[in-house]
Amino acid sequence: MGFDSPISSRQPSACVSSTVLARRLRRPTSRVGPRVLTSTSLGYRERLVEVLCGEEVLVLGVTSQQIHVLARRPANESELASENTRAERSVVGLSRAGILVLIATLTGLLVFPADSWAQNIPLFEAVPSKGGGTNYSVPVQTVILLTALSFLPAMLMLMTSFTRILIVLSLLRQAMGLVTTPPNAVLVGLALFVTAAVMAPVTDKVYSEAWQPYVAGRINFEQAVDRGVEPVKAFMLRQTRADDLNLFVKLSGKTYAKPEDAPMTTVIPAFAISEIRTAFLIGFVIYLPFIAIDFAVASILTALGMVMVSPITFSLPLKLIVFVLADGWAMLIGGLVDSFKMSA
C-alpha cells in the first residue's frame, strides 16, 4: 500500500527555487572593489595614494581640485594575498546568511500542511441567477465596492443635502464677520451629521428595498443597484428646479417623457446647481440682519465722530449676542432641515 507524500504538487517549484538560491550562494563572488594601500601627505591638500584595483596598483596624485594617475604597476603577491583573504571573508559571511535563508525556506515547506499549498485563489466569476441577470463572485463585488468608495466624496457632495448645508454654514460665518471661527473642520462635521439626519429616510428606503433583499438572496446585484438608485434619484428630483433639469436634458441632446426617465448623469449636475442656488438664497436672507447691525453701528460711530474706529470692533460682539439670544443655531439648522421637507 502506497502513502501520499506530505509535500503537495506545488511545493517542487518552491524546492527548485531554493536549489537555485543555494547554487547562486555557492558561486564565488567578484573581488571586493578598489582598496587604498598607502596614502602619503606631500603638502597642503596634496597626497600620493596607492590604490589596488584587481591585479593592478594605481599611483594617484590627489589634490583639492583633481586626481591624476601618475603610474601603474602590477600588484605583488602579498598585496594580492591580502585582497583574496578579504574577499573570502565577505563570501563566507554571505554564505552563512544564504544558508540561514535556505534553511528557513525548507523548514517552511515541511511545516505547512499540504492542503494549504493546494488552495486556489478565487477568480472573477459571473454566474447567471435564477431570476435572470447575473450574480458576481465576492472578489468582483469587492472590487466594485472599493471603486465606488473612491467616488464617495463626489457622491456625498453632489447627490445629498451636504452642499446646501455647508454653503449656508459658510455664508453664516462670513456674515457674522468671523474668518476662521468655527473652523472648517467643525463646519464640515456639522454638515455631515445634519446631512445624515436629512438623508435618513432615503437611506432607510435603500436599506429595506435594496440591501436587505440582496443579502437575503432574493435579488441579484444589478437589481439591488437599480433599487438603491431609485430613492436617491427621487430625492434629487424633488429638490431640482425644472429649468435646471431641462438645461441639462437639452445639453445631452435627448428627450424624455418624464423627469424620472432622465439618467443620473443628467440629474446629478442639475441637482447640484439647484442646491447651490437655493443655498445662495438662504445665505442672502441670513446676511440681512447682520448688514443692518453693521449699518447701525457705522452710523452711530459716525454721529459720535469716531470715524477712525473700525465698526467691526463693536458690530461683531453685537452680532454674536443677537445670534445667541435668538437661538440662531437651532433656527438655522431647523430651517435647513425643513427646507428639504417642504420640497417633498
Image (cartoon, grey):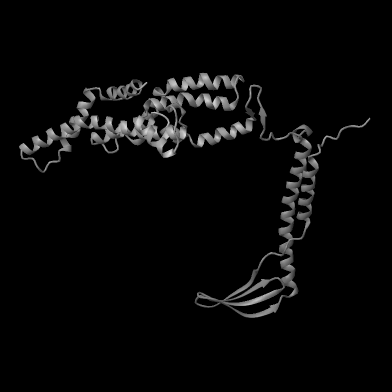
- Residue found farthest to the right: 1
Task: Kindly give the residue lying farthest to the bottom in the view shown.
Answer: 70
Asked if one can make out residue 186 in the rendered structure from this viewpoint, the answer is no
147 left or right, relative to 54: left
Q: Quick check: 266 above or below 73? A: above
Identify the residue shown where x is 31% and y is 30%: 278
Residue 315 visible to the viewer: yes
Q: Quadrant of the C terminus?
A: top left
Give percent across and percent down for residue 286: 24, 30
* Image quarter of the N terminus: top right
Q: Nearer the viewer, residue 245 or 22?
A: 245
Please indicate whether residue 221 sits to the left or right of residue 194 in the image: right
x, y percentage for residue 44? 49, 77
Viewer-proximal residue, 179 or 240?
240
The percent position of residue 65, horizontal first and vertical second, equals 50, 75
Left or right of 295, for residue 238: right
How many marks the image carries: the answer is 0
Residue toward you, 59 or 270: 270
Residue visible at 59% across and 35% down in the picture: 143
Which image quadrant for residue 169?
A: top left
Task: Estimate the x, y position of residue 80 in percent, counting from the top left.
Answer: 73, 70
- Would residue 4 appear left or right of 198 to someone viewing this image? right
